[in-house]
Image (cartoon, coloured by chain):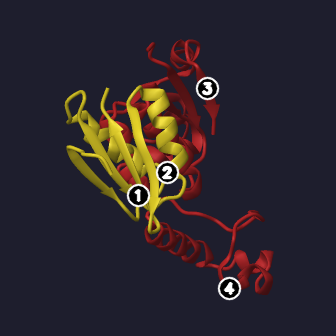
Amino acid sequence: MDEKKLAIIATKGSLDWAYPPFILASTASALGYETQIFFTFYGLQLLKKKLALEVTPLGNTGMPMPMGMDKWFPVLGMALPGMQGLMTAMMKQKMKSKGVASVDELRDLCQEAEVKLIACQMTVDLFDMDHAEFIDGVEYAGAAAFFEFAGDSDICLYI
Amino acid sequence: MAEFDTELDASGLNCPLPILRAKKTLNGMDAGQVLHIIATDPGSVKDFDAFAKQTGNELMESKEDGGKFHFLVKKV
């Protein structure tokens, strides 16, 4: 069986959007894919040593809210101070109760499975970030390096 | 249920953990050995079928019993 390749670009830095790249990459590895994730812009938040990811109900009409809160407190209510923290805590609680892995855990599984994690150096410079903020094992590169791998990939996803 | 060499209880775990745990356990087993996986995630039925097809490991048995799903996977 020839080894297949999966290339992912991760551009989002919220708790909910942290899941697709790590779930797909870890699963692909288990299926024998060689996998690489290129993190750019807000996606870099997913590589921080200490993850501080949140989920926001603002502007997210598809987000199921407990106790019909979206009906009682429409858009403006969702903008109240503390609402994002509350929603994040509730989401994490819900995930734990349903046996959904934490982002940390999935990221560890990806590293264990030798998924290559590449951070966009341009974004690191843009946001004045420091390599010391990121987990070990991350490589730093640019668009050309992504195409070197993605050009040979069987599946290429932009998340 | 046929004989097996190793058992993995993935009850309560959700996608993609049952598959990832199974893969990890299989890595530590010898070719020809059989892994029995117990899961509660209904999505795991199609997932283990797809896992076997793509990795070449043989899905010998897949059944539901009392709300739990049981899979027998023979390592290729």
Residue under label 3, please give it: A156
To the question of a shared chain for discs 3 and 1, the answer is no
User: Contact (CB < 8 A) between labels 3 and 1?
Assistant: no
User: Contact (CB < 8 A) between labels 3 and 4?
Assistant: no
Q: Position of residue A32 (x, y in %)?
A: 41, 26
To the question of a shared chain for discs 2 and 1, the answer is yes
Which chain does the yellow colour mark?
B
Which chain does the red colour mark?
A
- For numbered disc 4, what is the local secondary structure? helix
Instruction: Locate the C terminus of chain A and report the quarter of the image it occupies.
Output: top right
To the question of a shared chain for discs 3 and 4, the answer is yes
Q: Position of residue A66 (x, y in %)?
A: 65, 80
Q: Residues within 10 Å of mark 1 (few under 14, many from 20)?
A: many
Camera-near label (3 vs 2) is 2
Give me the disc on residue B64: none
Residue under label 1, please give it: B39
Tell me which residue sits at (80%, 82%) in the image: A71
Tell me which residue sits at (43%, 39%) in the image: A26
Residue A74 as seen in the image, left or right of residue B51:
right
3D distance between C-alphas at marks 1 and 4? 30 Å
User: Contact (CB < 8 A) between labels 1 and 4?
Assistant: no
Q: Nearer the viewer, residue A148 or B73?
A: B73
Q: Specify the subunit that label 3 lies on.
A: A
Q: Amino acid at mark 1?
A: Ala
Q: Position of residue A77 (x, y in %)?
A: 74, 81
3D distance between C-alphas at marks 4 and 2? 30 Å
Q: Amino acid at mark 2?
A: Ser
Give me the disc on residue A67: 4
Camera-near label (4 vs 2) is 2
Residue under label 2, please give it: B44
3D distance between C-alphas at marks 3 and 1? 30 Å
Tell me which residue sits at (60%, 72%) in the image: A84
